[in-house]
Image (tube, rainbow, N blue to C red):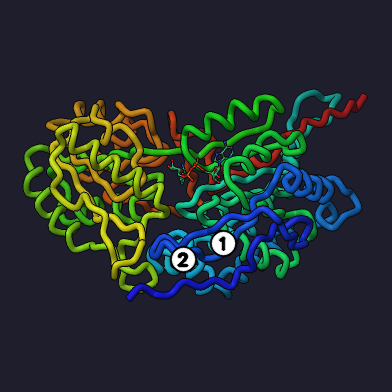
Amino acid sequence: MLTATKTKIAPGRLLVNNQWVDSPKRFDTINPATGEVLTQVAEASIEDVDRAVSAARHAFEDRSGPWRKMSASERGRLIWKLSDLVEKNIDELAELETLDNGKPIFESRYVDMPMVADVLRYYAGLATKIHGETVNTLESAFTYTLREPVGVVGLIVPWNFPLLLASWKLGPALACGNTIVFKPAEQTPLTALRFGELAIEAGLPAGVLNIVTGGASTGRAIVQHPGIDKIAFTGSTAVGKEIMRSAADTLKRVTLELGGKSPNIVFADSDLDGAIKGAINGIFYGKGEVCNAGSRLFVEEKVRDEFTDKLVARAKKMQPADPLDPKTRMGAIVSQEQMQTVLGYIDAGKKEGAKLIAGGNRVSLDGSKGFFIEPTIFGDVKNDMKIAQEEIFGPVLSVLSFDDVEQVVEQANRNPYGLAAAVWTKDVKKAHQVSRLLKAGTVWINTYGLMDAALPFGGYKASGFGRELGAHAIEHYTEVKTVWMNMV
Ligand code: NAD
């Protein structure tokens, strides 16, 4: 039986200046496991965004206000408190994320939410380590730099890791002393709204964090608003390009975390059982709706058949099930639209002549209207096929084969994206040589998909630019000011 849908989030509200504001314009947010409406969410208008920006601007500019007067240490303490509150409410947040996104509760409860808390703690600690430097230039001068917050930052995130990807931006934005207008994805706004309640409970001053829900038009209003200084965006490459063009008009700073089509490369000399687990995890974790999914699996020709047979046997055991069941490892696709997109790619794969060796179908659970797709694997894929070149963003794996290092590196890099990659081999020299040759922001060796709050993450090529996480993120949330004092 699919578990009944429920949510305690009050419908149709925006968070502006620490006040919950009702909005007349609303849209449904759907539980993808049942197709049922969870609740109604506000669709923020241009005027709503303007009010949120004014509140954020005021909180940032007011020199006698609480945010500007707060020391870095106090900011760190507030972020730490937020992290504590995330942990205190972890079960509720995890359940909300699963209801809204369809991901297994196992993932929301034991991966997403713990990492949200961890990322916030990392930046709580970093708040007191952000500083300029003194630079020796002339005997007659005292020259130094200050590192100042950028100002009002617009955060726009997608639906696949709703609160987790938001935390990657909220943590450094707050640690550096910025104020925020945050828009979650229209498919998954619920944890953001609950987080807003926790931010008030933690004592974040009015105007520091404003939350506007809505879709593309709300996002555009944020990007075009002259009162916003920087956009931190995670989402599709197509929207990333539009944001970059539009941000040029007001010369906003922009960081873009975009799509991926990451190569996962298995050499014959690797621990094949470990590599099989890594390949399954790399594509089917998060239903394959993961920017760094290992969606192109390159297997060395001499072990291809053995490897693929074992892979298929494992994939067939991973059938979709109720996302709220703790044993479930394959949840529901986030929306009907995304399910149709994924099924369209499966059709394209068949038409292009790839061999469907596992899955390929929509699944109905208990006759519900949920959006479930079987774990799907295509063999005999050529690198120029659509299913090997385009991001599917679903549980669909393309298996390709190769004979040597030169060939696999050339194929792995012959793709517009460059977010992540993995190499499986026991040959240490080969592992590091291939890692250097791959055009990707992250390369895993003998594992897949691991992340840490301290390690930078971001893309090469069409996967965007700028790095999130780690101390690198501070670069994107601060300006550097040079101060030159004449000592003569
Ligand atoms: P999307 O680009 O459609 O939407 C992302 C966000 O942008 C949403 O909040 C949406 O409402 C908003 N938006 C849409 N159009 C906009 C516009 N014109 N102006 C401003 N905002 C707009 O992406 P999606 O389908 O929600 O997410 C999937 C994509 O995100 C995939 O391509 C995936 O690879 C990428 N992603 C990347 C990373 C990364 O770290 N590189 C992480 C997760 C997801």
Q: Which residue is mark 1?
A: 190
Q: Is 46 displayed left or right of 31 in the figure?
A: right
Badge 2, how many Cα within 10 Å: few under 14, some, many 20+?
A: many
Task: Please say whether residue 126 is visible from this viewpoint.
Answer: no
Residue 407 falls in image quadrant: top left
Residue 469 x/y as whole percent: 53, 48
* Nearest to N terminus: mark 2 or mark 1: 2
Residue 262 falls in image quadrant: top left
Task: Please say whether residue 432 is visible from this viewpoint.
Answer: yes
Q: Nearer the viewer, residue 181 or 349?
A: 349
Residue 202 falls in image quadrant: bottom right
Q: Is mark 1 within 8 Å of ligand 1?
A: no
Q: Is 274 displayed left or right of 483 in the figure?
A: left
Residue 285 x/y as whole percent: 33, 56
Please report contact status of discs 2 and 1: CB closer than 8 Å, yes or no.
yes
> What residue is rendered at 87% in x and 29% in y?
485
The kind of residue on which mark 2 rests is: Leu
> What residue is rendered at 75% in x and 55% in y?
16
Label 1 SS: helix
Q: On the rendered image, what quadrant is the C terminus found in?
A: top right
Q: Which residue is mark 2?
A: 99
Residue 149 x/y as whole percent: 73, 43
The kind of residue on which mark 1 rests is: Leu
Q: Is residue 133 above or below residue 7?
A: above
Residue 276 x/y as whole percent: 19, 53
> What residue is rendered at 13% in x and 40% in y?
355
Q: Is 18 displayed left or right of 167 in the figure?
A: right
Badge 1, how many Cα within 10 Å: few under 14, some, many 20+?
A: many
